[in-house]
Amino acid sequence: MVEGILCLWFNRYMLSPSPNSSKKAFSRVALVGKLQADGVEERLNDLAKLVSGLGCEVFIEADTAAHLGLNSYPTKTAQDFAGAIDLVVVLGGDGTMLGIARQLAGSNVPLVGINMGRLGYMTDIPIQSVKDTLPKIIAGEYEADTRTLLDAVVLRDGKKINHALALNDVVVNRSGISGMVELSVRVNGSFMYNQRSDGLIVSTPTGSTAYALSAGGPILHPHVAGILLAPIAPHSLSNRPIVLPQDSVTVIEVINGLGVIVNFDMQSQTNLQSGDKVEVRQSDKTIALLHPSKHSDYKTLREKLHWNEYPSTF
């Protein structure tokens, strides 16, 4: 009797739990990979084994699986993630994250990014530390970060010809072979200015470290409730970037210019002609990015922009 009780106690309290019994905040995990990257197939397979070993059900995003020829795990399209996937792990750079995030906006499926690109503001987990970091996130040790998107409608003669979301920015600009474009900008119905330039960037706080930063715009903290307008090489040097309230509706009309386009996160675009209008506002859809515990946006900026480096003294 005593021997039996001791045996039960030993089995219950002393034996190490299997990986499948470990604590999990997410049970169904989908993997998305950068389609053009050296060694991405091997890294995705290693990532799938890691996640599966944590007791999670693993899926490969359908386009990723088809392009890379991965058939060891079941697949799902991004459109089917809502309600069927608990977490999306993105292996690539910020461009890969932008592509999948726009598709999942409003789905309540969080994303975590593993960096195989260059800068990686949103894919902020280095590939070298994934074995240490990802299990902790799946176990529930993470910080969630809600990001806003822009909702853009392209109008021609008062009729909608395109509608798109953007996590980074909506950019109206000239093509490479044309001259300056002339744009008229109104905010909440009030005339702001006519602008002659190479284009105009409408950016979220997330996008303020992307193209808008190269155009001289300020960096907005991700939690700032605002929309940034940043002109691209304006003819008038007094035409400066401005941050608008988050409920602003910006209408950009093409007054004059050849080869004018509007693009959305550099992922899709529409050709514009004189008289076309682009109406941009904050979307009611958001995405959630997950970061390791004790994540710091300032640390990310310091490392990505090399703020921690000082010029040599001679």
Image: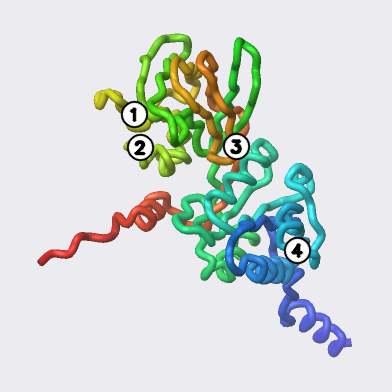
Name the foreground residue: 181 vs 283.
181
Q: Earlier in the sequence, mark 3 or mark 2?
A: 2
* Residue at mark 3: 268
Mark 4 vs mark 2, CA separation in Å: 39 Å
Q: On residue 215, which mark appears?
A: 2
Give the label, 4 or 1, closer to the camera.
4
Residue 82 position in % (x across, y down): 75, 43
Q: In the rendered view, does 84 fall on the left or right side of 124? A: right
Residue that appears at 57% across and 58% down: 92
**Residue type at mark 1?**
Pro
* Residue at mark 1: 241
Q: In the rendered view, does 47 fall on the left or right side of 116? A: right
* Residue at mark 4: 69
Q: Earlier in the sequence, mark 3 or mark 4?
A: 4
Dot 3: element: strand
Whether tag 1 and tag 2 are in contact, CB under 8 A, the answer is: yes
Residue 200 position in % (x across, y down): 42, 28
Mark 1 vs mark 2, CA separation in Å: 9 Å
Q: Earlier in the sequence, mark 4 or mark 2?
A: 4
Whether tag 4 and tag 1 are in contact, CB under 8 A, the answer is: no
Q: Earlier in the sequence, mark 4 or mark 1?
A: 4
Position above or below: 140 against 194: below
**Residue type at mark 2?**
Ala
Packing grade of label 1 (10 A; few <14, some 14-19, many >=20) is some
Q: Earlier in the sequence, mark 1 or mark 2?
A: 2
Residue 190 position in % (x across, y down): 42, 9
